Amino acid sequence: MFIAFMPQLQASAPTEHLGLSAGPAQDSVLRDSIGEVVVIAQRREERLFFTPGAVELLNGKALRARQARTVPEALVATSGVFNQSTSRSGSPFLRGLTGNQTLLLIDGIRLNNSTFRYGPNQYLNTIDPFSIDRMEVWKGGGSVAYGTDALGGTIQVLTQEPRFSSEGADWSGRAIGQFISQGMEQSGRLEGMYSGENTAILAGATLRHFGDLIGGDTTGRQNPSGYDEMAFDAKGKFRLGDNHFLTVAHQYFRQEEQPVFHKIQLENFLRNHFTEQQRQLTYARWQYQPQGSKDRLSATTSLQKTIEGRESQKNGSSVLTEEEDKVRTLGFSMQYEYHPVQQFRLSSGAELYRDLVNSTRVDINLISAGLTTSKRGLYPDGSTHLSAAVYTLATWELPKWQFTGGARYNYFAITTKDEANGEATIKPDALVGNFSALYGLTPKDNVFASIESAFRAPNIDDMGTLGIVDFRYEVPAFDLTPNLL
């Protein structure tokens, strides 16, 4: 028998919370004047009913009701999403695709980096589920708006927003506990928020311990499958003037000693663990919106760091292998939303991401006085991946009709520095577009048709991986070009 218990304590003085409509995430689920949900799947606020795509929304209420232990698990009951999982980590499938063929975003910033592999991966599980405000799943879309990897679609995770107050300073807090019987989970989170007229700050910290999974019928205890997790996040919003706003945020997430259950059970490993799975994201977003205007200008700069440490040792072997991959991603984007007339909207922008990949491996002989041998890491150490793009998305509305179209040009410069094969550089590019037409049958019914092209550019995992990944041995592949659909 499994028992889930999630008490919640919250205290706050009554206050009027003022959201900032220019942000990528609102104080709660956005609604228009007639109560319809608003999403930002196409990089701008759009009523879900009039979004010409298969978009699913999970708001905070739905996420809390599911009491999901992880972010991938929260997607299990979402229409059109299949979640592959061999432990608590999970990899979502959209349109039958996963890994580096689906795009993951957090607060509008790419979570995908140049080491994401082709098959299922664990990286969506590096987001604290307690910090989420809502999630949007865009099945089969996202390449024009967000770039490479969105062959199967796009999953956008939007974290909680601090809220301004119009009635003076206000303090509020929240405590969450989540427990599952038989030692499978003990989790706790503390949050605090300050709301002022021009300043709002939200911060939270989470500690979690997962014991071994207990399966039904003949599965029994999956040993080893438990691990520890900690997370911290803080976000501040500042009103710099009547029309200028600044958002500054930091997220820290770390898992320790997470076993790879299927490798230990199926591949004769004595030990196979992620010793460390860490992600840090820091970003600042400036927004400008003239008083009484729908036009909007924003700029975002971000720094994301991921660290993945692994240890493995075969049964009967005296060699312990320690590996570590570090990826540092610098990002910058600008976007301008222009409404020259009420029936026409245009969103145009540019973005730049640059990855630096460091990868190491050490073999330790446990019976030879700890003799260590340095070897090539899983990826070529010092490799870089640059992505630069410009895009535009336009919407034209007529009585009962809505037409949407867009285009993106993406340029890449990818360099791998392999000790055995030397340095290799490729500079592919891709041009993609989309078009859709929507017709309103009734106030509650519509029909739409859309056509989209998508692409996945080569990354460092494609060009430089040398070693065992999942159940196979991979070798580098040079001179690749983008895969267009």
Image (cartoon, helix red, strand yellow):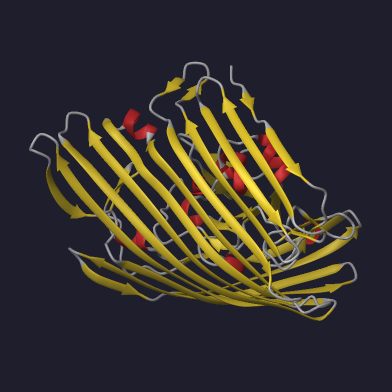
Furthest residue toward left: 368
Question: Which quadrant is the N terminus positioned in?
Answer: top right
Above/below status of 120 relative to 292: above
Furthest residue toward front: 169
Above/below status of 458 relative to 279: below
- The residue nearer to you, when weighing 331 against 316, is 331
| Residue at 50 percent of width and 58 percent of height | 111
Picture coordinates of residue 52, whole percent (x, y) = 74, 61
- The residue nearer to you, when weighing 429 against 319, is 319
| Residue at 82 percent of width and 53 percent of height | 15
Q: How many marks?
A: 0
Asked whether residue 81 appears in the rendered view, the answer is no
Residue 146 in the figure: left or right of residue 89: right
Above/below status of 212 relative to 117: above
- The residue nearer to you, when weighing 337 against 484, is 337
Question: Which quadrant is the C terminus positioned in?
Answer: bottom right
Furthest residue toward bottom: 340
- The residue nearer to you, when weighing 75 against 162, is 162
Asked whether residue 326 appears in the rendered view, the answer is yes
Picture coordinates of residue 33, whole percent (x, y) = 89, 60
Residue 325 falls in image quadrant: bottom left
Picture coordinates of residue 129, whole percent (x, y) = 59, 44
Residue 431 falls in image quadrant: bottom right
Residue 452 in the figure: left or right of residue 116: right
| Residue at 49 percent of width and 48 percent of height | 126
Picture coordinates of residue 479, whole percent (x, y) = 33, 70
| Residue at 45 percent of width and 26 percent of height | 212
Residue 315 in the figure: left or right of residue 92: left
